[in-house]
Image (cartoon, helix red, strand yellow):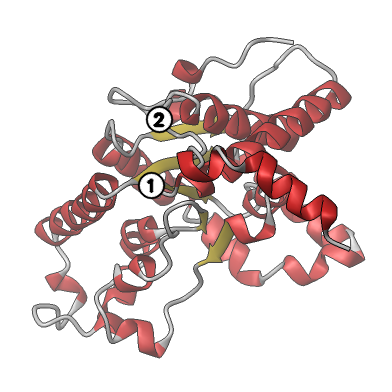
Amino acid sequence: MKKIEIGDYKINTTVQLSELSTFVDLKASEDTIKDELKSTRKKLGELQDTLYAHGKYAVLVCLQGMDTAGKDSLIREVFKDFNARGVVVHSFKVPTEKELKHNFLWRHYIALPARGKFGVFNRTHYENVLVTRVHPEYILGEYLPDVDDVSDIDDEFWNKRFEQIKNFEKTIAQNGTLIFKFFLNLSKEQQKHRLLRRLNKPNKNWKFSPGDLKERKLWNKYMFCYEEVLNRTSMPHAPWYSIPADDKPTARLIVASILLEELRKYDDIKEPELDPEIKARISEFKEQLQKDA
């Protein structure tokens, strides 16, 4: 199987989305890819146990992509071997009335993972420069002091919002959150295939909404916004990775492999040493238990 090179997917220079691949051939069968994922996610689960015992870092995994890009199934498959208490998934939908009474980052702040845990954002704070940029009228629902009309939402507004997002990530990174941002790069043709599959399979019908087709017509606008996001917000402390998403098993393995390889670089993540006084008395404690009727 072809080796997964992180540099092939990490955004560390200006990119054009049209030139980023939506498919990669790992030169392996689907069964081989699935077996490799099983091995990788098991190692990730063991690493999370150590992360929890260490207690100084949290891990935030951000997933963005167009409808049908495979976010839900990726979460299910990549984190399957985690201790259930070690990973918390948040799927961000349309903001609630309560959320709209706070600044747009509030609901993301309160959903951040605690130290020792993984947090997964299924759709993220970037919706606020993606969906709202394609549909600026949504901003009016935030009741911002300086925005009374869509015409008030200009380039300066978006520049300010990008800076707020970058400051948010910088702050949490400086306080021990390791950030991974994955853009599941799906082709328009593959999205068409997956939407048709939803319509053709009775057990998948519930996932379909006519709104999916309306959003699909705005594909080029979304691609422009995604390109801006990748180029403006991929930072050393919060990098973006563009993951070819036309093949779901391959995308899952690439994401899992990146997480494992990058997290292993933090060689300070170790299980704490047992207190020397307790360690010196281990034999005594064993003996007490063995004598316990």
Q: Position of residue 265 (x, y in %)?
A: 44, 23
| Residue ID at (53%, 65%) | 90
Sequence-first disc among 2 and 1? 1
Q: Amino acid at mark 1?
A: Lys
Q: Which residue is mark 2?
A: 268
Splitting the image into 4 quarters, where does residue 193 fall?
top right
Q: CA distance from mark 2 to mark 1?
A: 10 Å
Q: Position of residue 245 (x, y in %)?
A: 62, 36
Where 125 falls versus 270 (above or below)?
below
| Residue ID at (83%, 27%) | 35
Q: Secondary structure at mark 1?
A: loop
Q: Amino acid at mark 2?
A: Asp
Query: Which one is nearer the viewer's eye here, 67 or 49?
Result: 49
Q: Is residue 239 left or right of residue 55?
A: left
Where 275 falls versus 123 (above or below)?
above
Q: Which residue is mark 1?
A: 56
Query: Which one is nearer the viewer's eye here, 112 or 199?
Result: 112
Query: Which one is nearer the viewer's eye here, 226 or 110?
Result: 110
Quadrant housing the C terminus: bottom right
Residue 185 appears in the figure:
no
| Residue ID at (29%, 36%) | 237
Residue 23 appears in the figure:
yes
| Residue ID at (44%, 17%) | 7
Question: Quick check: marks 2 and 1 in contact, CB under 8 Å?
Answer: yes
